[in-house]
Image (cartoon, grey):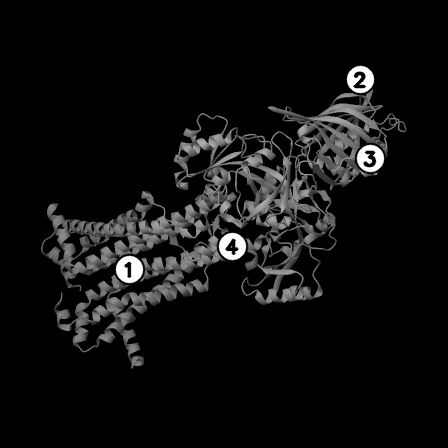
Amino acid sequence: MMKRTLPLLATLGWRNLWRHPKRTFVILFAITLGVWFMVISAGMMVGIIEQQVRDTIFNLTGHAQIHNPEYRDDPAIEHSMPPPTPAMLEILNSPKVKQWSSRVRLPAVVMSERESRGVTLVGIDPKHEQGLSLIGEPVVEGRALESIDDDGIVIGRRMAEKLETRVGKRIVVMSQNKNKEVADRGFRIVGLYRAELESTETAYVFTGRKTAQKLLGLNDDLSEIALITYSRDGLEPLVASLRQAAPTLETKSWKELEPLMVSALKVYDNFMIIWYLIIFGAMAFGLTNTMLMAIFERTREIGLFQALGMRPRYIVGQVLMETFILLLIGVALGNLTGWFTSDVIFADGIDLTEFARGMESFQMSSIMRFQLEARDLITINLMVIVLGLLASLYPALKAARYVPVEAITRT
Amino acid sequence: MGIVFHLAWRNLWRNRRRTWLTAGAIAFSTILLVLWVPIQFGAYEIMINASLAVFPGHAQIQRPGYQEKPKIRNAIDNAETLAKKLRASNQFVGVATRAQGFALLSSGTRSYGAQVVGVEPVFESGTSSIPGLVKKGRYLSGIDAQEMVIGAALARNLKIKIGDEVTLIGGGKDGSVAAAILPVVGIFESGSNELDRFFSEIPLHTFQNIFSMGHSAHAIAIVGKTVEEQDSLLTALRQETKDRNDIVILGWEQLVPGLKEGIQVDKVSGFIFYGILIAVVVFSILNTFLMSVLERTREFGLMLALGSRPKRIAMLMMLESTLLTLMGLIIGMTIGSALVYWVHIVGFAYPGMEDLAQQYNMPGLSRLYPQLDLFNFLIGPGSIFIATNIVAWIPVLRIRKLEPVEAMRTI
Amino acid sequence: MFPRITRTTMLTALTVFNLASIAPAQALDAAAIIKAAMDQWRGTSSHSTMSMTIHRPDWERTMVMEGWTAGDKKSLVRVLEPKKDAGNGTLLIGDNMWTFSPKVNRVIKIPSSMMNQSWMGSDFSNKDIARSADIIDQYHHSLLETQTADGHKVYVIQSVPKEDAPVVWGKEVLRIRDDYVLLEHTFFDQDMKPVKRMKTSKVGMMGGRMVALQERMAKIETKDEYTEFKMLSAKFDISVPGSTFTLSNLRNPRF
């Protein structure tokens, strides 16, 4: 029976809506606005989180790394690893892996005429770092490293300030070679790189991998292999296959390498749910209120329906259907405006630099970008529709309980 | 005026349900806003506290220039006496003297450079969370005990366990060679990579002996009641130390540069979220108001027909909405502040935060305690009040254009 | 060890030779002057005592040290005074550096991460001390001019580090007397502004050689912060047993 009544209710609901277009517009506006807020705040939050995750992965972490098992605790030269075996290469060069690169990554001291600082010397294969880490990005000054035997050095912008040096000058890098003897040489600064965090810029100096291997007497040995895939989730099979291919080495996914980031993600997820509930709470009150009033106003009309023999169940159904149609239109409009705001108006992000003075040198990105995820949109839309229907249940039930005669006689 | 007021008040109670619904919407929104801001700002306090609690404290007394260039010779004379005086003033929650130096720590086969800090074991726990973060063994037992606690990663790198001896070699304050062999009694895990890898603590008098410091030390760390009371803390410190012109007082902004700016950036995005919440709330109330005006079109028509001047009706409307808003606000603020107070007492366990707190080894992180502040408390309700009063103009403008007969015909 | 304190001081030590085989007058080529000095140095041993004064505007400290050298690869220094530090020692073999402290009775190898730390609180870093003599090959040397002072010819030599030399300076300018006493050694940054200078203030005979008896290292900008060396006694071309430069001798002095 419901099958037949549903289209009827829909038609009734639809007509009802347009009998009072003014009221309908007011409610629609409320729903659209609420959904829009939820969409852009989700976009904002996801944007902030994504940026942090991307920064973490881009900060020489990648999606997974292979090391000597001792290396992560004590990144010393004696904890190097041999170059990848054919079995490992087969996996690394498979289509599952988007980009991979081998690195020398060891503690060192850099010195200029005036300052010296502890850093990590990273020997890289510049071509393979593209899309894998921050050093694959264009430099902000000078030139990027060009090959594995490039003997120039690229340091952080703020590192250059700390060392009171600049592009074109020489600095000395000192470390320990395989025989535990001092290994040092001069390097000309060919370029400066930029990173979001000052701590990143002062942590790493980069040179060609072969140059670093030669300086440290490593031959072909490496400190780590980092790789990136097409998705940062579902890395387990890949990691497992690498573990199998290199049983004496340690393969870890970024989630194991950066547990703090993973727990921060969990906190953010929970925050978003709470946030939706709060926004919806504020919105629901308005929605319930409006529906209630709309119904009280129509008391007479509903009484008439009842007097004409409409059963309470259908009255509830009709009110719910009316709400449902309203919600659908509101949700659609909300998503549309939300998308328009985040992907068209603020496609380049919001520059927060104006708000927080001098924050360029600090912990967060100064540009806030929106990012809409299907998962969040579905959550928002389902939540609004389900809770919206629940919110209109009260006025609907209320309406169904009117005694016809009393209702008709009311003004 | 009295009559209008009377009329407005009576009008409100003529339609009890509508009044309660609208007032309820305002009250609910007020509760949301009143609760949200203190909890959000409470979170900043947690962020600040979390980074200050580990080691820096809320403020430090140092010699001028020590913060920029921590040279061992730049030490405060009779530092313990000064600390004792500060403690005796009973104005500070934690006061602890520290002597700091850089030394080579060796376990025989392995040697690493590390920060060595001489602390007053009894008082250090008042200014730093490290004593509580000892995961293996115990913390330092006495101010002249011959023992040492070190970071977990440093312990792993030195390949030592509880009870093993560490040789310490550095330069003393008088230029002499500072050397000692100390057994490791505790290993701490702070979650901070830097501390865990490069940090060790020994008792203050032991430090002063080894490094020929006499009765001098490098810093007195101070913790006040809350981070927010920084100004009064600094004033009190200045008052207490006015007879010493050989020292400087540094607030946490100077001790941990970047922290304040990081929070500022976070506050900006926090305010955006808050703005969104206010907007949703205001629009939701606007909706309710608008609905009630639509509903009362007939009533206005009747009043106009009976000879009321539009101006009078407008005034009546304004008064009604002001009364209604105030009612809602008072209810909301009463319940809201009761809730804030309750959360302030028991804390608010943020879902997922426990994990993060555990990773950081910061028990203080797992619960949020809202921050009580009059401005933060009033900003939400204030926005609602202003917004509803603006919204109340809409019906007023409508009334002017209303044709009595037509208005009376609308349902 | 004295000559090994720094490359600078090492060059100073070159002055101990009366480089009879090379008449300075003929050695007009800068590289040849330095090379010749080096060649002489490689076959020599020494035993000396000296004092080191570290001076700051509000503070001063003097240490007396005893040192042995054999060739340009090995040296051993031991502190004699003050009493508090007596017995502390540093052993250098090639680029490797060990330290010994009687307080803890342990020998510890200095890791490379500590090489930029100050040596015994002086204005020299461990790296300055551990500088290998081979470093000389890592410069392009050129003779800027020949001056005359106190009846001696003085060669002004400019040394510019090669591209990959582990030297941070833009250039170094040395003033060497014709009897190979280093009078002055100035370090320039890469904008060619002088940063620090080692200056010999007294030259005299000791152990049968003409040597720099007193020299001072100071930054150009802070002249009242310096480290000053004074040669107290010196013997040259003596026989120093190979076992002098061993870890066990660093720990249990036999010489």
For label 4, the crowd category at 10 Å Cα-Cα, with few meaning under 14, some 14 to 19 and many 20 or more, is some
Marks 1 & 4 on one chain: yes
Label 3: which residue?
C70
Marks 4 & 2 on one chain: no
C-alpha span from label 2 to label 3: 32 Å
- Name the amino acid, label 2: Asp
SS for callout 2: loop
Q: Residue furthest top?
A: C150
The answer to whether residue C223 is left or right of residue B294 is right
Label 2: which residue?
C150
For discs 4 and 2, the disc positioned in front in the rendered view: 4
C-alpha span from label 2 to label 1: 100 Å
The x and y percentages for residue A361 are 52, 43
Q: Quadrant of residue C187?
A: top right
Instruction: Give the quadrant of the C terminus of chain A.
Output: bottom left
C-alpha span from label 3 to label 4: 55 Å
SS for callout 4: helix
Label 4: which residue?
A260
